[in-house]
Image (spheres, rainbow, N blue to C red):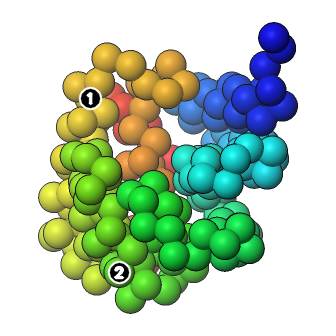
């Protein structure tokens, strides 16, 4: 049986994300941003073709949008997608991640804090990311820095990465959003290329 359309689109999204990550590691930011922009579109198309609880695709779309240099359109779309799909009240950790990230991107810090509180049930990785989002939303640089270090440490220890590239994409996204708030935490890691 051939792969379903949504799975083909998801595979294509991950492949373009990988291209963006490889370009970023090579220091070619323009090529990386173009690939991330493509990945964001593919994640969106994959979401639209998948079942209505495939929230991870909305997370991937927003992260790719931020790494492409934007993210606002993707965040607005993700929020609307949950509402339009009748999922506004969804309280799964991944749905909460979608909402927390969208709110953070859109500068709605109180909402970001609220949704980040619902992410922790998803396990340690969700809890670390939730803590970083909450720290950024509160403009608490120390809290954010501790959480960011924990996220990077987790990526450094992973044997496998979604795209096959050893890169802390979650940390890169958070660093980009922190920079938009004037918060820069100087960290060096083999999984955190300059961006």
Residue at 15% in and 70% down: 142
Q: Is residue 142 visible?
A: yes
Q: Is residue 79 visible?
A: no
SS state under label 2: helix
Mark number displayed over residue 4: none
Residue at 22% in and 46% down: 124
Q: Residue 80's image quarter?
A: bottom right
> Looking at the image, which is closer to me, 70 or 128?
128
Residue at 42% in and 47% down: 170
Q: Which of marks 2 and 1 is nearer the N terminus?
A: 2
Judge from the rendering whether residue 194 lies leftward or rightward of residue 71; answer left or right.
Answer: left
Q: Residue 6's image quarter?
A: top right
Q: In the image, residue 134 lies at what x, y percent?
A: 29, 73
Judge from the rendering whether residue 12 lies leftward or rightward of residue 118; answer left or right.
Answer: right
> Looking at the image, which is closer to me, 65 or 2?
2
Report the number of numbered marks.
Answer: 2
Q: Identify the residue at the far top of this view.
A: 1
Circle 2 Cα neighbour tier, 10 Å, few/some/many (<14 / 14–19 / ≥20): some
Q: Marks 2 and 1: which is nearer the front?
A: 2
For marks 2 and 1, give the CA distance. 29 Å
Q: Tell me the quadrant of the picture where the N terminus can be found.
A: top right
Circle 1 Cα neighbour tier, 10 Å, few/some/many (<14 / 14–19 / ≥20): some
Judge from the rendering whether residue 193 lies leftward or rightward of residue 186; answer left or right.
Answer: right
Residue at 80% in and 27% down: 4
Q: In the image, residue 32 lies at what x, y percent?
A: 67, 39
Q: In this view, does 110 lie above or below 130?
A: below
Q: Is residue 46 above or below residue 99?
A: above
Q: In the image, residue 53 lies at what x, y percent?
A: 60, 53
| Residue highlighted by disc 2 | 114
Q: In the image, residue 138 lies at what x, y percent?
A: 28, 83
SS state under label 1: helix
| Residue highlighted by disc 1 | 156
């Amino acid at each position: 049986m051939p792969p379903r359309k949504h799975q083909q689109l998801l595979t294509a999204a991950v492949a373009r994300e990988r291209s963006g990550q490889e370009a970023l590691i090579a220091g070619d930011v323009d090529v990386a941003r173009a690939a991330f922009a493509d990945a964001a579109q593919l994640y969106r198309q994959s979401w639209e073709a998948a079942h209505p609880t495939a929230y991870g695709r909305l997370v991937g779309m927003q992260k790719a949008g931020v790494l492409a240099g934007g993210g606002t359109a993707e965040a607005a779309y993700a929020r609307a997608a949950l509402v339009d799909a009748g999922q506004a009240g969804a309280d799964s950790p991944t749905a909460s991640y979608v909402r927390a990230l969208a709110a953070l991107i859109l500068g709605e810090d109180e909402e970001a804090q609220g949704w980040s509180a619902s992410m922790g049930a998803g396990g340690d990785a969700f809890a670390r990311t939730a803590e970083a989002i909450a720290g950024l939303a509160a403009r608490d640089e120390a809290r954010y820095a501790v959480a960011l270090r924990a996220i990077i440490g987790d990526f450094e220890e992973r044997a496998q990465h979604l795209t096959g590239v050893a890169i802390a994409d979650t940390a890169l996204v958070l660093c980009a959003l922190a920079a938009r708030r004037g918060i820069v935490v100087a960290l060096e890691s083999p999984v955190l290329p300059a961006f």
